[in-house]
Image (spheres, rainbow, N blue to C red):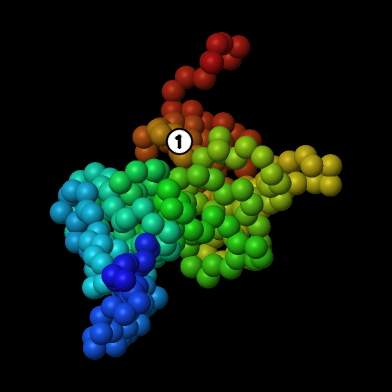
Amino acid sequence: MATTYSTSLKLALIGDGDQAGIWGQTTNTNLGTLLEQAITGVQSITMIDANYTLTNFNGVANEARNAVLVVTGTNNAIRDLIPPVQEKLYTIVNNTTGGFAIRVIGGSGTGVNVPNGATCLVYCDGTNFVNGLSGVAGNFSVSGTVTATTGAFTNVSGNGVALTAINASNVTSGTLVNARTTASSANGASTIVTRDSNGSFVGNVVTGNSFSTTNFTITESGGVLQFKYNGTTVLSIDSTGNLTSATNITAFGTP
């Protein structure tokens, strides 16, 4: 009976009576080389702004069998990393330059994008390549910075959690307890929005030395509130209520 090869890892399956005198060498290769590749192997892949198909050989070392694929090179668009469509788990590291994702996809079926600079778990279910980690069963703690390139944060909570670069129009649901301005320390930050027991949001007083728009700036100096346009003071109010304007003041006009 002839030697055949396993579907996913391409290990040699020695047939009855086959490989007399050399079967030990084949077994050692299966156990000491090929299985080690599948469990602990780290393979470097260099992309050259083109799709890349992983090598996939029977009974000898190849790229597709490795557990971890570290992808480098330069891409000017999203490029495909193409493993064989066989059941397997990969850790994909996108270390390419150019700022583009890598799409892990077989010769058929659907794939999954690995963002530039990210390390992701990706597995093949025998038909498609899919995200290998879409959630956790319990708490998930991060001591560094979490960056979302696409999608949404559905639950964010905790004391001292800082959220930056969030468009208010993207806050669609959920509970906003308190929102604070940035400060040098968490305790020094000013709470600008609070949520009461009825679920209503209340704005608090915001304290600062200067507030600016595109052209106007409002500042306080020596007890005088100054309104400046492009750096020139055009109006001021002192602590007793005296109003001083650089030009005419119109009453009962149309603003």
User: In the depicted view, which residue is nearer to us: 166 or 11?
Assistant: 11
> What x and y, as percent, mark residue 178?
68, 51
> What x and y, as percent, mark residue 85?
36, 53
Taking 10 as reference, is 188 left or right? right
| Whether residue 31 is visible | yes
Q: In this view, does 80 lie above or below 143?
A: above
User: In the depicted view, which residue is nearer to us: 215 or 203?
Assistant: 203
| Whether residue 97 is visible | no
When asked about the image quadrant of residue 68, the answer is bottom left
Residue sitting at x 62%, y 54%? 156
Residue sitting at x 71%, y 50%? 177
Quarter in which the N terminus is drawn:
bottom left
Label 1: few (<14), some or many (≥20) within 10 Å? few
Residue at which label 1 appears: 213
> What x and y, as percent, mark residue 99?
28, 51
Q: Is residue 208 above or below residue 170?
A: below
Q: In this view, does 129 lie above or below 226?
A: below
- The extreme left residue here reads 48
- The extreme top residue here reads 253
When asked about the image quadrant of residue 240, the answer is top right
User: In the depicted view, which residue is nearer to us: 37 or 148?
Assistant: 37
> What x and y, as percent, mark residue 114?
37, 53
Asked which secondary structure carries label 1, the reply is: loop
Q: Is residue 55 above or below residue 41?
A: above
Residue sitting at x 58%, y 68%? 141
Quarter in which the C terminus is drawn:
top right
Residue sitting at x 36%, y 66%? 6
Q: Which amino acid does label 1 sit on?
A: Thr
